[in-house]
Amino acid sequence: MKIIKKIDVNEISKWSSWPARLLGLSEWKNIKRDASKIESEYDKDKYGKTLVFFNKSKKKPTMEALKQFEYHDYRGTVCVSSKEKLLITKAEDALGEYYKILAREVLSEIKDGDAVVELGCGYGFNLDLLKKKSKKDIRFFGGEFSQNAVNLGQMYFKNVGSDIKLSQFDFYDKEYKLFENIDGPIVIFTAHAIEQIPDISNMFRALRKYKSKIRSVVHLEPTYELHDDSLLGLMRKRYAQVNDYSRNLIGALKDAGDVKVLSVQKNFFGLNPLNVSSIVKWKFKK
Ligand SMILES: C[S@@+](CC[C@H](N)C(=O)[O-])C[C@H]1O[C@@H](n2cnc3c(N)ncnc32)[C@H](O)[C@@H]1O
């Protein structure tokens, strides 16, 4: 990623409207992140609009064009974070860096013949990217709450002749039925999807049923509990609170009991420096 310059935390308010919101100096209404919020923000707004764009386009858009449509406000010069550093770069370079990290961290866990399952996969952008980047023989599956995203992904993959399979899935379900029809070994990953779940403890209860076929799990997710009391750390914590984002991934991992944490790369990279991806890898103990 080409860095234009490094900035001090004091300068972040020039690049983000969040510090003013977090300090109560510009309008903000705290969110309750329940099913109706996910339906309105993702199913109806983001994915509903992207689905209309797909259906209306005479020449069917590429996956990259769908992402561009969805991310229309992420352009120009942006502020990202790498560990605790704040960096200015071009939006396209930032996205390139993020997807390079995602592909590297997930693909390195997968062996020939494995299945890979993304939970909270949207319309399957990441799965499509991994399939294009991998030379291995991998089966690709996605689970997603938004029916519009599932429909869009299914139409897209059918149109391009891809065998990536998406189905409806909810992190809060008691049973994760999509795993019943997938043979192991399975590598699971999530990318800013657990972020949407304030309390993720249910996922560990639900996944345990399939533990014999799960090779490992990779998360690119914010880790609330790992933020320190620096100004940046405090802003990151408050950002998660006012958006009702995930706040117990690390605690739920510890509470699970039968889980071995393989690695934690704290606050590794943030397309939004206040909502930064840590990279967490774990597996069920035998
Ligand atoms: C920030 S998006 C990330 C999507 C995708 N992982 C990506 O990287 O492009 C968050 C995703 O989580 C999904 N999501 C939110 N709540 C969910 C739930 N309870 N069960 C499954 N998916 C959920 C949203 O619909 C959305 O697709």
Image (cartoon, rainbow, N blue to C red):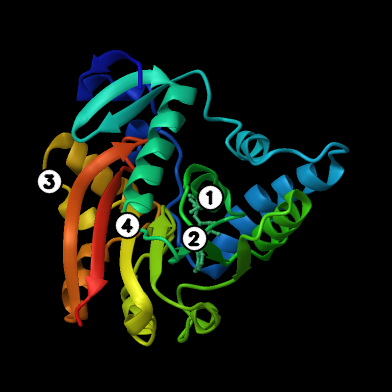
x, y (%) of residue 128? 57, 49
Q: CA distance from mark 1 to mark 3?
A: 36 Å
Amino acid at dot 3: Asp
Q: Secondary structure at mark 1?
A: helix
Snapshot quadrant of residue 264: bottom left
Snapshot quadrant of residue 230: top left
Furthest toward the top, the residue is 4
Q: Which residue is mark 1?
A: 131
What residue is at 44 percent from the left and 30 percent from the top? 96
What residue is at 61 percent from the left and 31 percent from the top? 72
Query: Which numbered disc flags the more N-terminal residue, 2 or 3?
Result: 2
- Disc 2 under 8 Å from ligand 1? The reply is no
Q: Nearer the viewer, mark 3 or mark 4?
A: 4
Q: CA distance from mark 3 to mark 4?
A: 29 Å
Query: Which numbered disc flags the more N-terminal residue, 3 or 4?
Result: 4
Residue 228, numbered label: 3
Query: Which numbered disc flags the more N-terminal residue, 1 or 4?
Result: 4
Q: Secondary structure at mark 4?
A: loop
Q: CA distance from mark 2 to mark 4?
A: 12 Å
Q: Which residue is mark 4?
A: 109
Amino acid at dot 2: Ile
Mark 2 in CB contact with mark 4 (< 8 angstroms): no
Q: Residues within 10 Å of mark 2 (few under 14, many from 20)?
A: some
What residue is at 32 percent from the left and 65 percent from the top? 217
Q: CA distance from mark 2 to mark 3?
A: 39 Å
Residue 245, numbered label: none
Q: Quadrant of the N terminus?
A: top left
Q: Which residue is mark 2?
A: 138
